[in-house]
Image (cartoon, coloured by chain):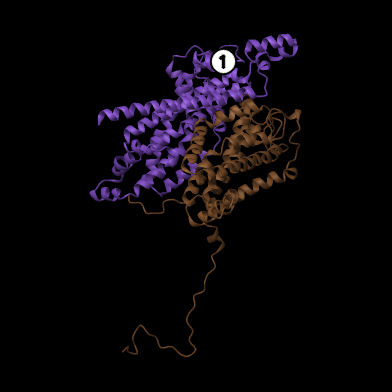
Chain colours: A brown, B purple
Amino acid sequence: MAEINDPRFRVVGPGWKEHQPVIQKPTLRKRLKGKPIPALILLLLIVAGCVFSGRLANHDPAGFYLQHLNQAPNSEFYFGTDSLGRDIYSMIWYGGRISLSIGLMSMAIICIIGIPYGCISGLANTRVDAIMMRIAEMASSIPNLLTVLLLVSVIGKQNTFTLSFIIGITGWFPLARIVRSEVRQIRSSEYVLAARCMGISFPNIMTRHLIPNFVSSILFVVISSISSSMSMESTLSFLGLGLPVDVISWGSMLSLANRALLLDTWWVIIIPGVFLLVTLNCITSLGNFYRKETNKKHSNL
Amino acid sequence: MPENDHLSFLKKILLRLLGFALTMLILSVVAFCFARCAPGDPLQSFYGDAVESMTSEELITARTRLGLDAPLTTQYVRWIGNAFQGDFGLSLKYKKPAMDVVSPLIGNTLILGLTSYLLVFLLATLLAVACALHEDSFADRLICKIGTAIYYLPSFWLGVVLILIFSIHLKWFPSSGAYDIGRARDILNRLRHMVLPLVVMIVSHLWYYAYMIRGKLLDELRQDYVLLAKGKGLTNRQIVWKHCLRNVAPTIVSIMAISIPHVLSGTYIAEAVFNYPGIGALSIESAKYHDYNLLMLLVLITGALVILSSMAAQTVNEVIDPRMKETGVSAWQR
């Protein structure tokens, strides 16, 4: 029999109410923790600048200001002018449109080819799967740049679409490989089996059952393919194989870098490069946010 | 049985050679089709603007002389037949046999590529070990952040900036070429020319591989034998260097095998930025000038280089890790 002054019990009056701790809403700061906010803000700023380039630019980006060749950054030309007398500040915003849209279009092409290829290969029987993966392996064993060079030299003069097509069509192998391994893991789960038994067509299985289940694990690859495509575009334009100088993108602005080296005009090289670099890094850190943390286990060391 | 072993070894070598031949064949067909279906007129690039002033008869004889009039299959058979005798046709830009244009440059590319390849993996392993030893410390996190940022630096831009700083302003290193004129045998001179391209190669590839190796090492550190080694009284350094790294070595070698095309692409860009006379700079140039005979030869050479070196890496892998032999799985199945 428990005594009256047992510490486990308490004598309370009639008006007693149990104390309810106030559930604190997580503060804004806590909710934002671990999310790539600075990168997101910077990226939004850059994208907004490119979208509203008409408002921001204070000169005609395609205009040649022949009295002001190779001017260092000053109050009229904020980022200086290049060896053709074009205003770099205005070109940055207009060029960003092309660079970003090439990144996005290449990403779309990579997804359109890579995801179905990986899904087919993952669902098919062992032999078909082996052949499909061998093909992808063989294609990716040739240096990416060389395939691009071959295609570029075949197509000849480039525009935004052909360039994104070339970058996309040579860049889908890693995505296909990851999609395949993800599909392999879920291919024998009940819902996929049920769907296949009911005779649902392949595109339906892919869009309804497969993609929703692996989208989170390929998001990182998809997002970082934007930045690698942009990087590829600028490399090609720099080498003189991408966009011509009169189509303004960050890459084609950098294609004047060799001439700028001779003239020792650093702003022509540094400024577009810094914009490119910052954008690439912002996109990547957004992508990294979606990357799965693999080992949470404690180290034995 | 040793004899049986011997036979299967021979068989494996034969199979590999067959695979090599098949890949090269497919590659040559693809390269050939690309080159011949291209819109750029090879006559135009061979004769330049003189094409426009030629009569139609002259054009026809020129076509016959360059072998452009036969059907595609005949052209291919003729081309591959000549290729076996080392004749890859005339370079349309240099007006010399393509092989003569390429052969002096292969050595330069191999020197640059191989040196940077070895340095990248040496430094990547060291960096990975350093990171793994101090996992989650401030230094490790800092290195991870900086590494990711640097990895997305476009390598051509890095090269241009390095030229701007080190060869134009500080005048420490030359900005282009593989050696000064007439000093091809001077090793010091070559080294001075190689410093900047090597820096570009290392910076642009290092973190990608260091991060991969770091991940593998961290997985390895979570194995039970590490606990045993710890209990035995080994220091962290000893555990990582003597036990973990040895277990990760086969993975590093297979990463090295897959990485060859990637590193070679990097060499091409570095060569183009620094005007380093190698097959990379040459293939970019020939793509620019629609010099298909040269480009096809370069594609074949690069393909052969990549395939042969990944075969070599696979063989090394089998020697250091016998487990690979039995399963024989390739990289994508693991």
Instruction: Tell me what residue is drawn at x 38 percent, y 47 percent.
Output: B219
* Front-most of residues A223 and B98: B98
Residue B15 shows in the view = yes
- Give the answer, above or below, for where B163 lies relative to A171: above
Disc 1 residue crowd, few under 14, some 14–19, many 20+, Cα 10 Å: few
Q: How many marks?
A: 1
* Front-most of residues A274 and A212: A212
On the rendered image, what quadrant is the N terminus of chain B found in?
top left
In the rendered structure, the answer to whether residue B195 lies left or right of residue B283 reads left
Res. B66 image quadrant: top right
Residue A118 drawn at (x, y percent):
53, 43
Residue A115 drawn at (x, y percent):
56, 44
In the rendered structure, the answer to whether residue B80 lies left or right of residue B225 reads right
- Give the answer, above or below, for where A123 lies relative to A71: below
Three-letter amino acid code at disc 1? Arg
* Front-most of residues A100 and A132: A132
Residue B217 drawn at (x, y percent):
37, 44
Instruction: Tell me what residue is drawn at x 49 percent, y 84 percent.
Output: A17
On the rendered image, what quadrant is the C terminus of chain B found in?
top left
Which residue in the structure is indicated by mark 1? B78
* Element assignment for label 1: helix
Residue placed furthest toward the left = B232
Residue B187 drawn at (x, y percent):
42, 18
In the rendered structure, the answer to whether residue B325 lies left or right of residue B205 reads left
The subunit letter for the residue under badge 1 reads B
